[in-house]
Image (spheres, grey):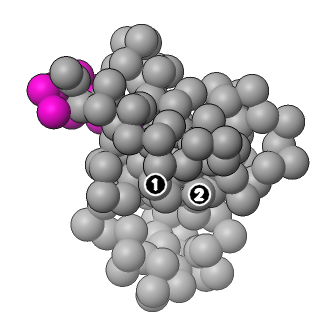
Amino acid sequence: MTRAEYLKRYIADRWSGDRASEVCLSIIDFIVSNPSNKSSFLTYNSIARISDSDGSDVDDLIRAVSILSGRFSALKMHFVFIDEQGAEFPLPDEDAKDILSDGYYVHPNTRERIEGISKYIYPYYEGDKPRLLSEA
């Protein structure tokens, strides 16, 4: 039995009837049935699309992501800096916490110091397909 199969069974049993469990199952299915690059930059919007959400169930999406990125480690959280022109710059995991606590960031292209950085930093998630396909 793969870890994905185990997780799906566990989540379906543990949270049966809960919308967050349905979202979890949709995310797991998406990760294991697509090439890894398709699940390397999952945002809340893309997770909503994957799970056929209309966006009104934000709490369920957040809970599903918490479940899968917590002890199950099916999703890995990362951060991206999006500047005012919409350019995206993934942040090194080891730097993200410091950048957020410092409250500023030096733009990688312009070298300009950007204050109030939290409004430009967004989480994204990476599906861990090898982990999900490994034996449970």
The total of numbered circles placed on residues is: 2
Residue 102 is covered by the magenta coloring = no
The residue where tag 2 is placed is 63
Image quarter hosting the N terminus? top left
Disc 1 marks a residue whose amino acid type is Ile
Q: Quadrant of residue 129?
A: top left
Q: Quadrant of residue 33?
A: top left
Image quarter hosting the C terminus? top left
The residue where tag 1 is placed is 67
Foreground residue among 34 and 67: 67
Residue 42: x and y, percent? 53, 37
Q: Residues within 10 Å of mark 1 (few under 14, many from 20)?
A: some
Foreground residue among 29 and 89: 29
Foreground residue among 82 and 133: 133
Residue at left offset 39%, top offset 53%: 69
Residue at left offset 59%, top offset 57%: 63
Q: Is residue 20 left or right of residue 110?
A: right
| SS at mark 1 in the image | helix
Residue 99: x and y, percent? 42, 76
Q: Residues within 10 Å of mark 2 (few under 14, many from 20)?
A: some
Residue at left offset 47%, top offset 49%: 14
Q: Tell me, for residue 75, which label it has, or none.
A: none
**Figure check: 37 above or below 41:** above
Q: Which residues are magenta?
A: 127-136
